[in-house]
Amino acid sequence: MSENIITIDGRKLEFKQEETILEVARRNGIFIPTLCHLKGTQPTGSCRICVVEIEGGRALATACTMPAANNMIVHTNSPSVLEARRTILALLLVSGNHNCAIAAKGSEEWTEFQQQVESYDQSDELCPAHSACKLQAYAYRYQADTRGLERRETEYPMEMASPLILRDPSRCILCGRCVAACNEIQVNNAISHGFRGASAKIVALGDADLLRSDCVFCGECIQACPVGALVEKKSRYQIRPWEAHHVRTTCHYCGVGCQMDLHIKEDKIMKITGVEDVLPNLGRLCIKGRFGYDFVQSPERLTHPMIRENGKLREASWDEALDLVAAKIKEIKEKHGPEAIAGISSAKSTNESLYLMQKLFRSVIGSNNLSSPYAASGLNNPIGELEEAKTIILVGCDVTEENPVAGTFIKRAANKGCNLIVVSSFPTKIGAFASAQLLVKEGTESVLINGFIRELFERGRKGSDETKDTVAGFSLDRVTKITEVASGDITAAVEIMDSNGPSMLVYGSRVANLAWAFLSLQELLGNLDIRCGGVNFLGEANNSQGACDMGLLPNYLPGYKKVDDDEAIKAFEDLWGCSLNTNPGLDLANMLNNMNGSDDGSDKKIKLLYCIGEDPAVSAGSVSDISNALKSLDFLIVQDILENETIKYADVVLPAAAWAEDEGSYTNCERRVSRMRKAVPAAGKAKPETWILTQLANRLDRDWAEMSSQEIWEKEISMLVPQLRGITYDSIDNGGLQWPVPDHVSLGTTTTRLNGYRPPLQWGSFVPFNYHHRTLLEQCEGLLESLPRSGGIGTRETPSDPKDVTYRFIQVLEEETVQWEPVKNKIDEILATYRSRRGGLIPVLQQVQEILGFLPIPVQNYIALGLGLPPSDVFGVVTFYSFFTMVPRGRHIIRVCLGTACFVKGAERLLELIGDHLNVSIGDTTEDREYSLDVVRCLGACGLAPVIVVDDTTYGQVDPKKVIDIVEGHRTVRAGD
Ligand code: SF4
Ligand code: SF4
Ligand code: SF4
Ligand code: FES
Ligand code: FES
């Protein structure tokens, strides 16, 4: 007989080493009540509601802390246990405002009271957690009796300061679950127990309100609170727990793909909670996922198709709009060929709509000009492995902001002793958890990674000769000089990764184009295809991986089949019933550059752009003449859910159904395909993207059947993409599967053993800036006020007097412009246009930066004043997006690529020559403001290395002897020069 046998309520049960009585009981379906216990955290044993009787024990024991032991005999419902629970509950009930559950006489009164309150839910006296409160449920279950006990009022008032979270100390039972959720699950360390005895309470830093604390408004504490002491402010008294129906879905913000339940009442999303115990997030959510839902019901949703007529957009019917789009596609295809047509589709769309988009382009239009700006993939290990990693190398990822739930796994790992190496070009919050923090000069990350590789060779690591030759030039001295990271810090980081393996390398969108360097590093360290290893990409967009898998790439079909591989594309031609264009299409950068042309349009290649869910007028703002490029298109179709800047140039606007208004699937960064479900009806006349694309194909003389998302997946996607073959909607109904899933019996590839299968690492050559999250969050009540802000200069020194703000603004204009008044008028005009509109901040900043070249604090404050926003919000955005600058920039921006290929081919020398010639260092601007010198990570043109870009012109194979001529060729010619 096994050694590990415990008897609970007469049942003999096996237990595992270190299991508690509670865990054994729960695993076997035996109920023991808990209040303070929170799975995944250290038990505190503070509430004592879980007491059980152990035969031979001197006193009752708490089941959540007591380890199971062999031959132990436990009773969970003995008279003494029940009596103890009743007493604990009665004391808790009188310790605060728990009016919903004070039973004075007997059980009949309980029932009457329950019935009464459930039919009367208007009173704000009635706790918002009524019917979902554990204390109430237990009080009823054990018939707690408070007779003879005096009720104690709390001395602390309700805290209403935050727009998202309401704290009501009068209902707090001091169980400490919120503290454990904050400090141990999310590792935000924002709250703790404070004061003693009758004054005890849960406090944030300095006993301030949450808004002024370190709270990041993840809401984990609300989800953990067993009573009504912490509630969502937005839904308080808007929805009673029993009124909601729940729809399980996948978060649409970042690449973690958290699983969540939408609480729906009257076709509106009222509240969101994480799905406990389900991968990848185990119930955790971040501020965006938990609170960022109101954009779905925003008044600024696009609700009907529009057509431009006489320069103005007017409402149109779907038939009218789709007929026009189809006619234009036909016309341009006939006149200029299919390659004059290009499509951009957001990596926020579902797999099914991305698939149909590329099918429309490839099989109907005949063009491979397809791009999804955030399409990227890694060789990811499961996110959960982060928590068990020995070492994590985190590069170019502000994980607590961009992928906060993945950040919780990393922080938990660091707390358990994992070595965390953080490489970033700016300070990050996760840096506080690092064993080694390397602050690298913006754009030089690849130099540092190659430096790591060279050091590892020096230390005796064995790798290919090719890799060794590639990194030969990355000596410690040179790397130190270029990256500005101290050599001691570099060697310390290398020491960690060399002797504390395996390490998981984790990287973000900003360095997605360095994927191959990461692969070389991990290969050398022996960290590929092993547990707690891998090259793990954390996408900022929810479906970055899906966009690659679905072939939203100019050179790959779905499943990474090259467009020019005749043999590989046969299956597509057979299923689609057509022959395909085998010319690789243009990537995003080339698309944008090919939209501009001379006035007669003869030299531009792209005449028609179909843009789904992207806003190039804003996101490609660094392309200096993006507005001209959009204007010069013959026809522009914008399909989106909200008003955006690109719509200004659109000929037709098609309103799409948003997340939660449509069915489909997303593939998260660990290749997990999960369901996105319809929970509410689409706004106005908005339609699912798959419907729109099908309608268009049929107007272009095809005969596409109208298929549900499930049919598109099962009849086409899983047929054409071998790694997705085994996935059906049924198989992912209760939880996603990680591909490859080769057949229907496979449960996916949850381990890291990809069996040598390597999806190609993809990235765009041009990474626009990600406006998506901000734009959606701007439409959500309370979000922007609560998002963590960048501190530091500017936020505090904001004058509040409008006259003072205007005076300081004019001072800047006087310094920066020849005639300040017309410039001020122009800026005032911009501010007036956006004043009453939500979501105007980014476009305003962009336009003002276009005028002034930079956004110093006085200008930011003037913008804040003009838009009626807090100056700290403006400051937060300017410092968050690298596209904005607070320091003056040159009229011409020189970017030298310091990716591996360019470095090896002499980019460093080019950098030196330009720097010496202009007398500037990296990141600086010449005194006459003519040039700024930047370095960039790989530009995706490695075949042309070394590469430099001046403004929007790319120069390849640059000869050091000619580099100064190239630079000087861009100098502004002034009258009289
Ligand atoms: S919202 Fe998140 S960070 Fe704030 S107190 Fe609650 S758990 Fe902590
Ligand atoms: S606020 Fe809620 S979770 Fe936190 S201690 Fe009070 S009752 Fe427990
Ligand atoms: S971490 Fe990402 S997927 Fe999870 S809730 Fe936050 S935004 Fe959504
Ligand atoms: S749940 Fe065990 S002591 Fe609170
Ligand atoms: S290294 Fe790829 S373009 Fe420079």
Image (tube, grey):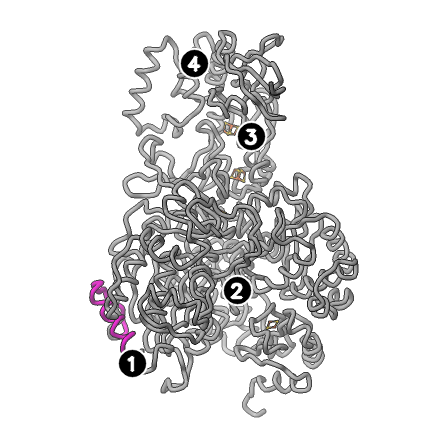
- Camera-side residue of 80 and 93: 80
Location of the N terminus by quadrant is: top right
Q: CA–CA distance between discs 3 and 1? A: 70 Å
Q: Can residue 424 be seen in this view?
A: yes
User: Are the residues tagged 4 and 2 within 8 Å (C-beta)?
Assistant: no
- The residue mark sitting in front, 3 or 4, is 4
| Image position of 515 (left or right of 739) | right
Mark 2 packing: few (<14 Cα in 10 Å), some, or many (20+)? many
User: Are the residues tagged 2 and 3 within 8 Å (C-beta)?
Assistant: no
Q: Looking at the rendering, which quadrant does residue 653 occupy?
A: bottom left
Q: Disc 3, ligand 2: is the CB inside 8 Å?
A: yes
- Camera-side residue of 11 and 392: 11
Q: Please, which residue is most extreme toward the bottom here?
A: 976
Which residue is under mark 4?
Answer: 142
Q: CA–CA distance between discs 1 and 2? A: 32 Å
Q: Give the range drawn in magenta.
A: 311-332
The disc at residue 763 is 2
Which residue is under mark 1?
Answer: 334
Q: Which residue is drawn at 52% across and 63% down?
A: 762
Assign a secondary structure to mark 2: loop
Assign a secondary structure to mark 1: helix
x and y, in percent, of residue 40 in the image: 56, 33
Q: Looking at the rendering, which quadrant does residue 341 occupy?
A: bottom left
Mark closest to the chain's N terminus, 1 or 2: 1
The disc at residue 202 is 3
Location of residue 662 with respect to 762 vertically, above or below: above
